[in-house]
């Protein structure tokens, strides 16, 4: 049974690294600072929901993949 925990941070970090993007470069592509990427990956905050389709496209996954 799913724990209900949002694992978006782990997924972003995994897919970003798998695509070879640094936090700096990924932030540039997303239109956010590298500090924002770092905060997402450390679970200090989450990306704005409107960014999820952009993130998925850049990371070559689906929005649902962030929650699976």
Image (cartoon, rainbow, N blue to C red):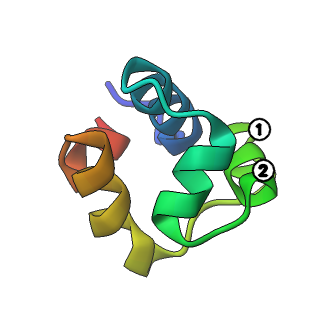
Residue 56 pos. (x, y %)? 28, 52
Q: Would residue 37 appear left or right of 58 to someone viewing this image?
A: right
Q: Are marks 2 and 1 in contact (CB under 8 Å)?
A: yes
Q: Residue 60 got which mark?
A: none
Specify the quadrant that holds the C terminus. top left
Residue receiving disc 1: 42
Secondary structure, mark 1, is: loop
In the displayed structure, 18 sits above or below 46; it is above
| Residue under the point 31% across and 42% down | 59
| Residue under the point 46% across and 41% down | 4
In the displayed structure, 47 sits above or below 66; it is below
The total of numbered circles placed on residues is: 2
Residue 15 pos. (x, y %)? 39, 29
Residue 42 pos. (x, y %)? 77, 38
Badge 1 local density, few (<14 within 10 Å), some, or many (20+)? Answer: few
Residues at marks 2 and 1, CA–CA distance in whole angstroms: 5 Å
Secondary structure, mark 2, is: helix
Q: Would residue 11 appear left or right of 37 to someone viewing this image?
A: left
Residue receiving disc 2: 39
Badge 2 local density, few (<14 within 10 Å), some, or many (20+)? Answer: some
Which one is in front, 33 or 1? 33
| Residue under the point 32% across and 24% down | 1
Which one is in front, 38 or 65? 38
Which one is in front, 68 or 57? 57
In the displayed structure, 57 sits above or below 3; it is below
| Residue under the point 37% across and 57% down | 55
């Amino acid at each position: 049974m799913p724990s209900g925990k949002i694992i978006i941070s782990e997924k972003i970090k995994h897919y970003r690294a798998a695509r070879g993007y640094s936090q700096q470069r990924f932030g540039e592509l997303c239109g956010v600072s590298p500090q924002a990427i770092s905060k997402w990956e450390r679970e200090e905050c989450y990306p704005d929901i409107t960014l999820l389709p952009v993130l998925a496209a850049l990371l070559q996954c689906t929005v649902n993949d962030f929650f699976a």
